[in-house]
Image (cartoon, grey):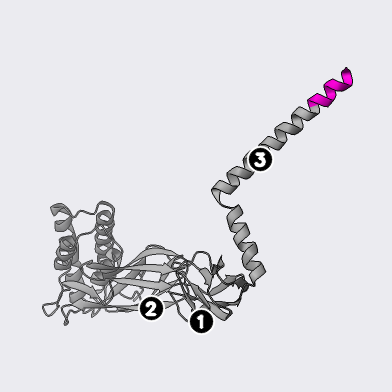
Amino acid sequence: MLMVFSAFPGAVNANRDDMTIEQQMMLRRHYRESTRIIRDLRGSGVITPEMADELQKHVDQWYEIARDAGDSDYKDLTRIIDEMLQDQDHISPGQRRQIDSILKKPTDYVMVTGIRIDKSNLVLPIGHEETITATVFPADATNKGVYWRTEDPLIVSVEAEGRTAKVTAHSPGSVKITAVTSEGNYRIHCQVEAIVLVSSLAIEPNQLELYTGESSELRAIVEPSDAIDKSIKWLSTNPAVARVDNTGIVKALTEGESRIIARSIQDETIAAYTTVNVIEESATQVSDNILLERLNEPAILLSISIVSAAILILCILLFFYKAKKKRA
C-alpha cells in the first residue's frame, strides 16, 4: 500500500500497513485539533467547558480509530499531551487532573497525588555539588516522572537524573530549585544558597617586639574578600607573656616570647600566627616612659601651650620694638 500519511511526533508510524489512508488522515486531524486546544490552554491557563468537551471528542475519536486499526500505540496521544503540558506553571493540579480524565487513563492507572523532596534548604559552597531526591505519591503511581528546573543556572545549575537531581554552585547567591511531577503538575521547592568560603588567612605584622606594658593591634587579612564568614578567633600560646583580646589587640606582660594565632571560625584548619617578643624595660626606659606619659597629661600640655604662646607674643613685640627703633 502506498502510504501518503506523514508521521508526526508520537503518532502512528507512517510505514505501517495496518491502517488505511483514511484512518491515518483522521488520526492526524484529531491530533492536530487536540494539540491546538492544549496550546490554547497553555496560553490562557484556563480550560473552559467548551474546550474540555472538544478535547474529549477528539481524544475519543482518536482512540476509537486506533483501536479499530489494531494499533497498540494508540495511547501515544496521552504522552504527547502530557509532554506539551509538562512545563506549564500556570495550569493548576485540578485542571491537569481534568485533562488526565479526558485522556482516558487505563482502569488500572494510578494517578499522582503529590511530591516530596529530601531537602528543603541547602547551603552549598562555590564549586561543590549536592543531590536532591524526590518521592512521588502514591508509591504505586503509574507515572512517577519528575522534571527539575533552576531559577538561575549561572548561580546554581541542576542536572536531572530521573527523580534525583544534582545541583552545583557556581557563583554567590540564593536560588530556588523546583521539582515538578510529569503528571498532575505537582511541585515543590528547595532553596539553595551558594556561598564563598574562606580560603586563606594572614596576619600583619608577622613579627612584633614590645616592651612590657605596651600594647599593639594585629590585623587579620581574610581571603577571598567576599567570603561569607570572615570571623576570627584569637589566642596566645603563652598568655603569661602576651595576651590578646577578641579584636586582635596584644598586651605585653612579662619578658619572653609568645605566638599570637588567628583562626578562621568558619574553618578552624585555616590559621596564621605572628611571633611577639616582649622585652623587660630598663630603669632609664621606665623614666623616659614616665616622662612621656607626664608630658601627655592634659595639665602639662596646657602649661606648655601657654608658655609657647607667651614666647611667641614676646618675639612679636621684640620685632616691632626693633623696627621702631631703626626708624627713629
Tell me the amino acid under the disc marked 1. Asn
Residue at left offset 61%, top offset 71%: 210
Name the image quarter holding the C terminus: top right
Magenta segment includes 321: yes
In the rendered view, does 192 fall on the left or right side of 51?
Answer: right
- Which of pointers 3 and 2 indicates the residue nearer the eye? 3
- Which of pointers 1 and 2 indicates the residue nearer the eye? 1
Tell whether label 2 touches label 1 (CB within 8 Å): no
Decide if residue 16 is in sight here.
no
Instruction: Find disc 1 in the rendering and name its residue.
Output: 238
Instruction: Find disc 3 in the rendering and name its residue.
Output: 307
* Sooner in the amino-acid sequence: mark 3 or mark 2: 2
The range drawn in magenta is: 320-328
* Sooner in the amino-acid sequence: mark 1 or mark 3: 1
Magenta segment includes 284: no
Numbered badge on residue 130? 2
Decide if residue 64 is in sight here.
yes
Q: Choose top left, top right, bottom left or bottom right for residue 102.
A: bottom left
Front one among 263 and 325: 325
State the separation of the CA atoms marked 3 and 2: 75 Å
Q: Position of residue 203 (x, y in %)?
A: 57, 71
State the separation of the CA atoms marked 1 and 3: 47 Å
Q: Position of residue 110 (x, y in %)?
A: 14, 77
State the separation of the CA atoms marked 1 and 2: 43 Å
Q: Position of residue 322 (x, y in %)?
A: 84, 26
Front one among 101 and 59: 101
Asked if 149 appears above or below 52 in the picture, the reply is below
Tell me the amino acid under the disc marked 3. Val
- Which of pointers 1 and 3 indicates the residue nearer the eye? 3
Residue at left offset 27%, top offset 64%: 85
